[in-house]
Image (cartoon, grey):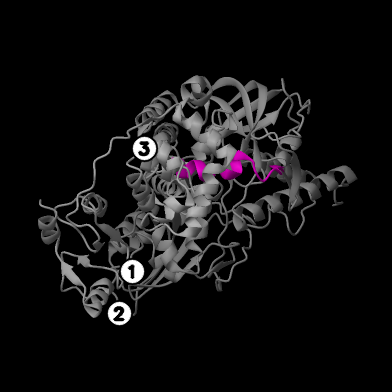
Amino acid sequence: MNAPIISDEKRARIDDLVTKLNEASKAYYDEAAEIMTNYEYDEMYDELLALEDETGYVRDDSPSVNVGYETQTALPKVTHETRMLSLNKTKDREELRAWLGGHEGLLSWKLDGLTVVLTYEGGRLSRAVTRGNGTQGELITANALACRNVPKIIPFKGNAVIRGEAVIKYSDFNRINEAIDDANAKYKNPRNLCSGSIRQLDPAVTASRSVYFYAFTLTSAAPAPGMETSGTDEMLERSLARRMEWMREQGFDVVPYVKVDSGSLISAIDEYEAQIPDFDIPSDGLVLSYEDLIYAGTLGATAKFPRNAIAFKWRDQQADTILREIEWSPSRTGLLNPIAVFDPVELEGTTVSRASVHNVSIMKDLELGIGDTIRVYKANMIIPQIAGNLTRSGNIVIPETCPVCGGPTGIEDDQGTMTLVCTNPDCIAKHVKRFSHFVSRDALNIEGLSEAGLLKLIGIGAVRTFADLFRLQSHEDEIVAMEGFGKKSFDNLTASAEKASHTTPARLLYSLGVPGIGTANSGTIARACRNKWSDIQALTEEDLTAIDGVGSVMAGDYVRFFADAGNREVIADLLSVLELDETYEAAGTALEGKVFVITGSLVNYANRKDLKADIEAEGGKVAGSVSAKTDYLITNDPSSGSSKNRTARELGIAIITEEEIMKMLGK
């Protein structure tokens, strides 16, 4: 039989698709980057399969042949005993039911993490390996032991091989990201964070990331010599459900599953779909497997897919709408990310009007234009994305000036991905750390404002100066419409700003970010000026060096800060929206001139900060470390062998308890 004749056009299209899909896989798996949406990848992959079937032209490096991307790390490589194939997929429920036919099946979540193979010998975990490229993975045994729920020892004393998915839950992912101030350093999604966490060279990092393991396949369970087997164990050869139950008996958390047949399959899918909004584990669909392992074992596999299971991916609900605007969202590095703003549409039960376009390259590939009819969807029923552009006018003009500061912009090529950046080093967005400091707990304490939230406010023009944070009411409509905000969040934010506007001179001084001025010396300076802001702002170098703890370098920086016309303008603007409490109570003298260090837990005080405030109110000072200048070390465990206790004893410094300092304070 003659091979089909392939046109140059189709051959070129296959070459182009293979190149683009492999680049996307490399970025996703090795670099935790996304250069195309999931929808685009699936569309291109399906097109590639159709062209390969039609022409018979299949490249050796085609993603239809290769089952995974070979990652590049320093972890040792291990060859799997049996090749790990990926699953064929469908988005059609009736096609799924036809695949099951008259057989019974198990329907389970398709978790979105990193597949790991665990090997137990004599009941102990002996090896853990990532899926890798399906043939060869990476040895991560120490990291697997650092996962939250991987059993180190199981009751079965033979040799067992368990496959499962390592994941980071949405709740833990959000907690980890909330602790990162730098918006640009936040992790993109739980899957990439999990992949990086499980493949760390330091298991302590894995342990800190709250990685969980959910078993989904018992590959083998061979009894040790002399072990007895029972009739129940024989069911492991015949029943997939029995294998799932067996893994649970061994102490594993297993992927949630239900038994189905052709009559109950559709309703079971509906029940899974209803759980998506509250399901805490990342998932990108379902897996349907034959329950009868004897039958499943007769089916074999294709070059890439096993025939005993199939993946079901959610058919994304799509809607057509009109693109009205491209907003350019800033980051602290100067990167300007395009955000599509379109007429609101209902998707998956919520109203959507915005979607990230990710970068200039994707925007140009979509040929976006104002007024275009675009098709939008929610990836995995959660994240708004653009599926395609029906009219493709391509009339978007890349801004030549930064929408935040008005400075010049430029296009940068990051390994083939085009991005827009602000080139002005003084751009407000690049100095978002100043705003983060201003709203922090020890400064003005505006609760609920992360660095990411500040960048969004800066991006829409709601915040240009510190004082703008107290004028957000005039931008209510724009803020409520922002991703991650809403009416309740807006009300909470403005209420927090109103509360923060009633503050003290010491807090205001610390919040301005004067070089060298921390919480301790801002309080000292405020007290020296009897809480009069006009005096605080007018201090000379001579005045400052006369204050205990202020040196000549700090005094010089301080005076230059307040002499700067721009800073004085910012402060004047702030004073117009703040209410300063300048009342002053002279400090007591009971502890005047004494230096204290506090260590260990407290009983009568909620925290060290409260005890420190009482000591300072009586003229004392609190230092962070023990030195020859220290008069007292306060600890409720005087006999402790801690470094501070040892140093105090070596220097002959008095060690007192919390009760003793309270007596000195007259409490």
In the visual, does 65 lie left or right of 145? right
Q: Position of residue 349 (x, y in %)?
A: 47, 24
Residue picked out by circle 1: 152
Instruction: Report the residue at 50% width, 31% height from top.
Output: 572
In the visual, does 172 lie left or right of 192? left
Residue stretch in magenta? 420-438
In magenta stretch: residue 632? no
Alpha carbon separation for disc pair 1 and 3: 63 Å
Name which quarter of the figure residue 150 lies in.
bottom left
Asked whether residue 379 appears in the rendered view, the answer is no
In the visual, does 471 lie left or right of 591? right
First along the sequence among labels 3 and 2: 2
What amino acid is found at the position of numbered circle 1 in the picture? Lys
In the visual, does 411 lie left or right of 176? right
Alpha carbon separation for disc pair 2 and 1: 23 Å
Question: 487 and 597: which one is in front?
Answer: 597
Query: Which dot marks residue 532?
Result: 3
Q: Position of residue 324 (x, y in %)?
A: 66, 21
Q: Please, what secondary structure does the residue beneath circle 1 have?
A: loop
First along the sequence among labels 1 and 3: 1
Instruction: Report the residue at 25% width, 73% height from top.
Output: 642
Residue picked out by circle 2: 226
